[in-house]
Image: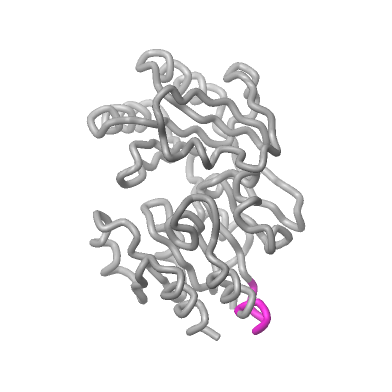
Amino acid sequence: MQYIFDVDGTLSFDGKTISPLINRAIKDLIDADNEVIFASARPIRDLLPMIPSFTDHKLIGANGAMISLAEEIKVISKIPDKDFMLLKILIDKFELNYIVDSSWNYASRITQSSFIERMIDPAQLAEKITLDEIIEPIKTIFVNVDNELQHQLITTIKEKTSLNIIGLSGEGTVDITASGINKFSTLKYLEIEDYVAFGNDCNDLEMLAGATRSVWINSKPDLQEFSRQMDIICKPDPEAVANTIRSFI
């Protein structure tokens, strides 16, 4: 069986590490002849330091916009130039804080403190470049956005583009990828159909809906309504997550 794991809020609860308890459970799952795939909102660059023991596995990054197969990175779909121009206009108009990822390097401006800062290139593997130097935008995140502005941005982008947009719960962010791109679409691209999925947020919903068995890590109380759609609900606790993983062995 193939097991798909989201990372932040599902396996990691501090944005920096995954508990040894969970890592051992994942290794036990692999030792029992299962395949493990990680599917994250992070670009591959920022996912790698979170999973040092599993970097040679199939990885889905940037909410499905990129993959790593046998440690080779491939872009599935970039944000079209005309749509990226609109995003840059919005950045200027609203003086937005942002992160824009290319296939490896990134551009960012974060003028207010944000939890997401510590997740940007934590291993210093890439180069921070200017927004104008981004020629292959894979994912854009607007950061430190209040609810009213989040709604306004999402409405504007939906009216003028077909980009995929997610306002992540309680994070004050807007995640943007190319049209039709999400974790589930990339699983289909990889021809993965029969799988168990673990997730915790709106960007996991398509992946969880397509799973043979879905496991919801209840780390965001304001999204508890989605737990009713899942096969298994798990506390956001390393021991509970590890035990749930082992229950499939």
Q: Is residue 30 magenta?
A: yes
Q: Is residue 111 left or right of residue 101?
A: left
- The answer to whether 1 is drawn above or below residue 189 in the figure is below
Q: Position of residue 108 (x, y in %)?
A: 53, 26
| Quadrant in which the N terminus appears | bottom right
Q: Which residues are magenta?
A: 29-35
Q: Quadrant of residue 50?
A: bottom right
Q: At 50% from the left edge and 32% from the top edge, which residue is drawn?
A: 140
Q: Could you say which is closer to the camera, residue 24 or residue 99? A: 24
Q: Is residue 229 left or right of residue 75?
A: left
Q: Is residue 113 magenta?
A: no
Q: At 46% from the left edge and 25% from the top edge, which residue is drawn?
A: 110
- The answer to whether 211 is drawn above or below residue 157 in the figure is below
- Report the colour scheme: one colour
Q: Quadrant of residue 149?
A: top left
Q: Could you say which is closer to the camera, residue 60 or residue 117? A: 117
Q: At 51% from the left edge and 57% from the top edge, which residue is drawn?
A: 7
| Quadrant in which the C terminus appears | bottom right
Q: Could you say which is closer to the camera, residue 111 or residue 3? A: 111
Q: Could you say which is closer to the camera, residue 109 or residue 82? A: 109
Q: Position of residue 160 (x, y in %)?
A: 38, 26
Q: Is residue 231 left or right of residue 52?
A: left
Q: Position of residue 148 (x, y in %)?
A: 23, 30
Q: How many marks?
A: 0
Q: Position of residue 93 (x, y in %)?
A: 37, 13
